[in-house]
Amino acid sequence: FKTQVFFFLQIIDLRNKKGLTQLDISKSMGISESYYNLIEQGQRQKNMNIAILYGLSKALKVSVNTLVDKEINFARKGD
């Protein structure tokens, strides 16, 4: 659960640093703003599927590896 929360906080942080809104990201991903909000709140995609992960990486203009590596590093620190 702790790594899951970290992943969503990481997405919010990246979005804010890039000056993007939830609407910006949701439009870029082709999903509704309300669905994207649920993703950020951890209420959807609890097991992140590759399509959502890829969409997030494109919308945030970071590589999938960046998202995954941060998650893995955090998980290792928690062990």
Image (spheres, rainbow, N blue to C red):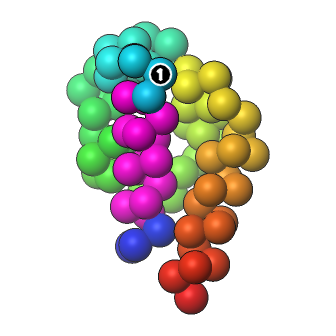
The relative height of residue 48 versus residue 76 in the rendered view (above or below) is above
Quick check: is 66 in the magenta stretch? no
The relative height of residue 41 versus residue 32 in the rendered view (above or below) is below
Instruction: Provide residue 42's location: percent of width, then percent of height.
Output: 33, 52
Q: Residues within 10 Å of mark 1 (few under 14, many from 20)?
A: few
Which residues fall within the magenta stretch? 4-16
Task: Please identify the quarter of the rendering in which residue 33 is found.
Answer: top left
- Closer to the camera in the image, 42 or 78: 78
Instruction: Provide residue 24's location: percent of width, then percent of height.
Output: 39, 12
Task: Please identify the quarter of the rendering in which residue 70 is found.
Answer: bottom right
| Residue 30 visible to the viewer | no
Looking at the rendered image, the quarter that the N terminus falls into is bottom left
Quick check: is 9 in the magenta stretch? yes
Residue drawn at (32%, 22%) of the image: 22
Instruction: Provide residue 26's location: percent of width, then percent of height.
Output: 40, 19
Inspect the image, locate mark 1, and give the three-letter code of the amino acid beneath it.
Lys
| Residue 42 visible to the viewer | yes
Instruction: Provide residue 25's location: percent of width, then percent of height.
Output: 43, 19
Residue drawn at (70%, 56%) of the image: 69
Q: Is residue 28 left or right of residue 62?
A: left
- Closer to the camera in the image, 19 or 43: 19
| Residue matched to label 1 | 18
* Secondary structure mainly formed by the magenta segment: helix
The residue most toward the bottom is 79
Task: Please identify the quarter of the rendering in which residue 50 is found.
Answer: top right
